[in-house]
Amino acid sequence: METTSNRVCPVWAAYTLLIPLRKFQHDPQKILSPYVTEGMRVMDYGCAMGWFSIPLARMTGAGGTVYCVDIQEKMLEKLEKRASSKHLSGIVRPLLVGGNYNPAELTDRLDFVLLFAVVHEVPDKQQLFNDIFGMLKAGGKVLFAEPKGHVSPEDFRRSVDMASLAGLVVSPEKPLDNGLSCLLVKEKSA
């Protein structure tokens, strides 16, 4: 997957995403607890250094797995160190796009996918949504959110349309109070 350097968060800037004050705006427990329970297999796509990955690992527990996907090896290295220091290494599974990330290996295995402020950085959004649809189990959910200011409501709507083309259904539930967000579902077969 190609990337354009001006659209991807640099490693040095990702440290600012780990500051504790961020919890007032993006509290992982509050945002994710309605969708994630112990034993689940989940994915944090665009995980960076793991603002959401570490709490996801605590939520899924030892019986769960958190696949942490990023395009930058340095981000995943920092995430691995953070997970190790919190005794979560066995739960957190770093996957590098262009490396060991292979969506076909996860076909019908995921219960939940987090796409938080990342889709606007992905060059082939349609392929991303197609891959996510394939990796989700029937009934699996995707929390998709983009930051206002970086993404216009029109661009967000276009991304939601791509998710729909991939087969994901938009839930009426609004996962976040502010910003651009939606909950997508892979419906169970009839």
Image (tube, rainbow, N blue to C red):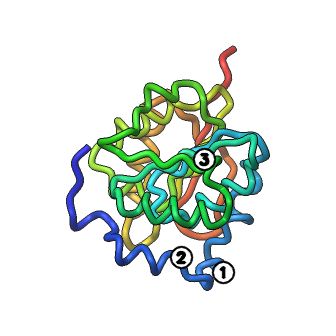
The residue that appears at 60% across and 47% down in the rendered structure is 66
| Percent of width and height locating residue 78 | 46, 66
- Three-letter code, disc 1: Phe
Question: Which circle's residue, 2 or 1, is located before the other in the chain?
Answer: 2
Q: Which residue is mark 3?
A: 66
Give the Cα distance between marks 3 and 2: 18 Å
Whether residue 179 sits left or right of residue 119 in the image: it is right
| Front-most of residues 93 and 134 | 93
**Quarter location, residue 64:** top right
Mark nearest the camera among 1 and 3 is 3
Question: Which circle's residue, 1 or 3, is located before the other in the chain?
Answer: 1
Relative height, residue 111 to residue 134 (above, below): below
The residue that appears at 40% across and 47% down in the rendered structure is 159
The residue that appears at 65% across and 77% down in the rendered structure is 23
- Three-letter code, disc 2: Leu
Relative height, residue 103 to residue 10 (above, below): above
Callout 2 touching callout 1 (CB < 8 Å): no
How packed mark 2 is, by other alpha carbons closer than 10 Å (few <14, some 14-19, many 20 or more), is some
Q: Which residue is mark 2?
A: 18
Callout 1 touching callout 3 (CB < 8 Å): no
How packed mark 3 is, by other alpha carbons closer than 10 Å (few <14, some 14-19, many 20 or more), is many
Tag of residue 24 = 1
The quadrant of the image that shows the N terminus is top left
Q: Secondary structure at mark 2?
A: helix
Whether residue 49 sits left or right of residue 113 in the image: it is left
